[in-house]
Image (spheres, rainbow, N blue to C red):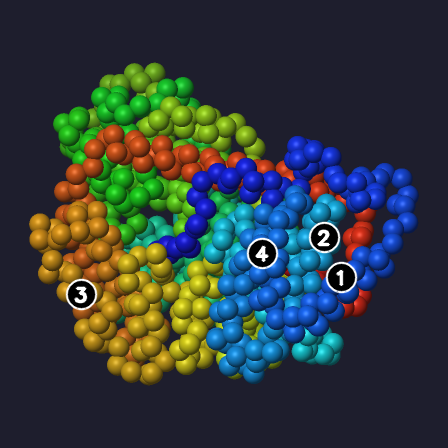
Amino acid sequence: MRHLARVVAWRVSPHPTCRRALSTTTALQASRGPPRKQGQHLSKLVHHKGPAPPRDESKTVAKLAARSRADSVSQGHDPKSRLRLDFTKKYTGRHGVFRSTVLHRLQVVLTQLASSQFSAAGIGEDELNRQAALFMNALDHAFSLAEQNVTRRDKNPLFWNLRDTFIMKDIKGLTKEIQYSFQSFVVRQRFSKELEDSQKRLLDFRFPLEWFPATRTMQRTIHVHVGPTNSGKTYNALKALENSKCGVYAGPLRLLATEVYQRLKAKGRPCALITGEEVRIPEDTDQYFSSCTVEMVPLNTRFDVAVIDEIQMIADPERGNAWTTALLGVQAKEVHLCGEDRAVTLIQALCASIGDKCVVHHYDRLSPLKTMDTAIEGDYNKLQKGDAIVAFSRLSLHVLKRNVETRTGRRCAIIYGSLPPEVRVQQAALFNDPDNDYDFIVASDAIGMGLNLEIRRVILESVTKFDGNQNRLLTYPEIKQIGGRAGRYRTARSAAKEGSASAEEAELEKVGYVTTMDHADLRNVHRAFQKKVDDIEAACIQPPAGIVERFASYFPPDTPLSFILMRIKAAATVGPRYRLNIGNDILEIADIIQDLPLTIYDRLTFCYLPVALRAEGAVDVLRALARVVAENSAGDLLSIKEIPLEFLDTNLEDYAGGAQDYLYRLESLHVAINQYVWLSYRYAGMFRSQALAFHVRSLVEEKLIQTLERLDFTEEQLENKRKSKRLQAQARKMSMKQMSEGEAEDLEQEHDDPPLLDWPGKDEHGRREAAQAASSRSS
């Protein structure tokens, strides 16, 4: 359970002035009026279709150099003075507002660096100021190019990275990118060409398949099972697993790993359950199957058959590396991949590069699927037996469950990821049983990933989802996967009891339907099932811990791990079928624990800890857990004061903060206990209270369920919440669309035009490196 908890400062549509500052379209330029007549306008050179007219680059370079000398003489290399001058200056270019924002955030970064790691690394105030003045020249150059419509990542990497980060991660992300860009600017001045070449060789990530030499000694057969939801692809892959002597299943969720674990045990196969927060190993045998989350696949064990579910997640920026690692590294004679059609081209290319045999199996839906033209519109009387309402927060699920039961007089089951496995199995059985009054179910989007539920109609409570950064619209593949769960086959028992049903009724029973709670969301659902989704082009990878440790040796011991990781991302050479990604949480966790005396390996371990950094007290808990490892101390659960165990003694009636705040405090405690359990499997000698942690976690889960069932949340509040999320997601989508359209126009305008200026002080080698680094980072 990983919560992507990045603070987002900009959640609404940007102000028109900000959009203008970020845009590079000619239409927006025209709306600002004709350019000032100071000789020939530079945009004419960009749009020129014939031979490029001669341009006097020396004058521009000389002007920049003169200004740099003037600043150096008059201000003594004091960037703060220059920042104050630039920040108060009114910029009239298309990127003027954005430029002011960058300068302001740079001022913040320099203030922080003056008293932090850079001082400790031997860079004094005078040197910091001198480097800041030089970096200011680089910023001037980048924005000068941008005013000429030179904004492509390979021609103006500094501007492209800053603008792209601002759009994707808002002010906080922009500040981090400025800090990295400045640190990288300073450090690279100190490296010789030979040292840079050595780093490049270390960061050659073109062939990640070579990271698994033992697997490369095997001749594997890769079976790719692709098709829509409810097509039987996973069923056939699991059949191959059951018929083998030794095998492993890897799924995206603990919930699915638990389901396969129970399925194999029910068939008499000894099986282990291995997830980040739970490990169950058979005690009476050494020969057993394994059911895991993808991140926990054993790569040092040989299997007859491996099943990797939801292979399309190989392209996910945050978790895709786990699927890539499992595919390239699992030691199995047969590897069965289950997923969507859009992954086939990539898998075939990867198999060809490895030398593995690839066999593709295509499946069609076992039952027809229809999107409805009408929504529920909050009328629970429209619900029918077999309906599943899908929501994306624990609060919404419990409010919906209560509303359904109150309005219909029938029972409603509930399933979501953090429920104990036994409770989830019980709730699914209640819903599937036709002989009781559990006619409905509310569930998280986990049902889109293969849970065995007999659903007739899927009702999306919303088409927006909080992804850890912001509320966003569901992607078309996500909608298709969730909606595709509709269309159930009757169980053998129900078919026997209804043997007299007509053939027409039987066919109607098989049809699946998809609709939404609000009519405003229906259009997105219709588009999702009508539009063809593009193929996946690249598999995501992350740098292995060993390479990170070796690369860190090039830098002073106190160099922040976040900088080392971002430097790897910028400098690595990546093959065309791979994309190097370093998650947002990884960088944030690295900074939170930077001052603690940990090894690089231990820091990386904590970077993969399941976190919810936005939760109350989350940072304090994280630092307390890391301090146990740093000090090699006893990490008994009761001795870690930052984990608020005493909150278990507080009842909802006695809590003054209100029901919702009480719920959030319980959720924060639940996350903290899960972190302790996660670490107890990796540092067993330090975090020794695992059994107690299991018991406390069960107590917290009981209180969570009790609290959720008692929350007083009206249908009107729920509808307003959906509307607010929808508006935020749509604003975000419009902003991204404008950004991509501007980028596309830039590409068209610059197709035949090289940069008009050279970066002052950089040679040809440096310019090539900057372009290559920018290209690598973008991938």
Cα separation between marks 3 and 4: 48 Å
What residue is disc 4 on? Answer: 87
Residue at image coords 54%, 51%: 166
Q: Where is residue 270 in the image (x, y as percent from the top left)?
A: 30, 61
- The amino acid type, in three-letter code, at marker 2 is Ser
Q: Where is residue 744 in the image (x, y as percent from the top left)?
A: 68, 40
Looking at the rendered image, the disc whose residue lies closer to the viewer, 2 or 3, is: 2
Res 645 label: 3
Looking at the rendered image, the disc whose residue lies closer to the viewer, 1 or 4, is: 4
581 w.r.t. 606: above or below: above
Residue at image coords 16%, 61%: 647
Looking at the rendered image, the disc whose residue lies closer to the viewer, 2 or 4, is: 4
Helix, strand or loop for disc 3: helix
Helix, strand or loop for disc 4: helix
Cα separation between marks 1 and 2: 10 Å
Q: In this view, does 278 lie to the left or right of 316?
A: left
What residue is disc 2 on? Answer: 144
